[in-house]
Image (cartoon, grey):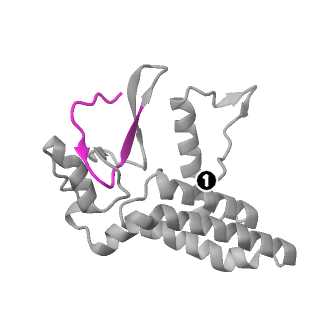
């Protein structure tokens, strides 16, 4: 059990916290795998806004974040962080359109396989590169979308598909526990992948 007295701020956090009514406590959970001995970071503000705005929001508390995401921020990285949620919505919409087109043409999901899948994988790579490779916001939504794409394409054995399924299962399990929902009923797993 983690007792928090001070957690270091990072705008590329590896943990998040939520208040649990069931236990009437703050519960911290990993947003990605954390190596033994690695420092635990939380974000004190929104991570999807430009560095100037993050610093402005923290100023009343006499705090300036000096994490890598803030100290190495560029105009390009600020724009990417700000646009990530919108870009995810566009990718989701394009996937739905391509899937519908492919199904009507009965062409083996060619557009989804050749155009959409590489674009979503590239978007996730950029999210990770920017320090946003955590199970929140655009990264979480890209994980859900990739899971659906891999299922649609029947590509269960792809290494990235296995990684996506593992991440999604861990996130769904953590969310169910925080919300006090059962993980199984009558011996059957009741976790369901959310829809975008």
| Magenta segment, prevailing SS (helix, strand or loop) | loop
Residue at position x 65%, y 71% from top?
A: 94
Residue at position x 68%, y 42% from top?
A: 192
In the image, 56 versus 131, the foreground residue is 56
Q: Write down the region rendered in magenta.
A: 1-18
Residue at position x 57%, y 38% from top?
A: 173
Q: Where is residue 163 in the image (x, y as percent from the top left)?
A: 56, 57
In the image, 15 versus 86, the foreground residue is 86
**Residue 13 highlighted magenta (yes or no):** yes
Q: Quadrant of the N terminus?
A: top left
Q: In which quarter of the image is the C terminus?
A: bottom right
Query: What number of labels is visible?
Result: 1
The answer, for residue 128, to whether it is visible in the render is no
Q: Is mark 1 on a helix, strand or loop?
A: helix
The residue wearing badge 1 is: 165
Q: Position of residue 137 (x, y in %)?
A: 48, 53
Residue at position x 66%, y 51% from top?
A: 195
The answer, for residue 39, to whether it is visible in the render is yes
Position of 135 relative to 179 (above/below) = below
Q: Where is residue 89 in the image (x, y as percent from the top left)?
A: 57, 63
């Amino acid at each position: 059990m983690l007792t928090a007295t001070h957690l270091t701020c990072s705008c590329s956090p590896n943990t998040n916290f939520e208040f649990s009514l069931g236990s009437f406590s703050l519960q911290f959970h990993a947003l990605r795998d954390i190596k033994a001995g690695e420092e635990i970071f939380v974000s004190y503000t929104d991570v999807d806004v430009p560095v100037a705005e993050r610093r402005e929001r923290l100023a009343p508390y006499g705090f300036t974040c000096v994490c890598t995401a803030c100290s190495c921020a560029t105009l390009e990285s600020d724009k990417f962080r700000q646009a990530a949620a919108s870009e995810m919505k566009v990718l989701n919409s394009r996937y739905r359109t391509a899937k519908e087109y492919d199904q009507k043409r009965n062409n083996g999901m060619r557009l989804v396989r050749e155009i959409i899948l590489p674009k979503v994988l590239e978007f996730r790579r950029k999210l990770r590169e920017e320090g946003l490779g955590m199970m929140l916001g655009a990264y979480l939504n890209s994980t859900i979308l990739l899971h659906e794409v891999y299922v649609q394409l029947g590509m269960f054995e792809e290494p990235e598909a296995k990684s996506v399924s593992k991440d999604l299962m861990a996130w769904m399990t953590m969310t169910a526990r925080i919300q006090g929902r059962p993980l199984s009923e009558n011996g059957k797993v009741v976790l369901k992948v959310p829809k975008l």
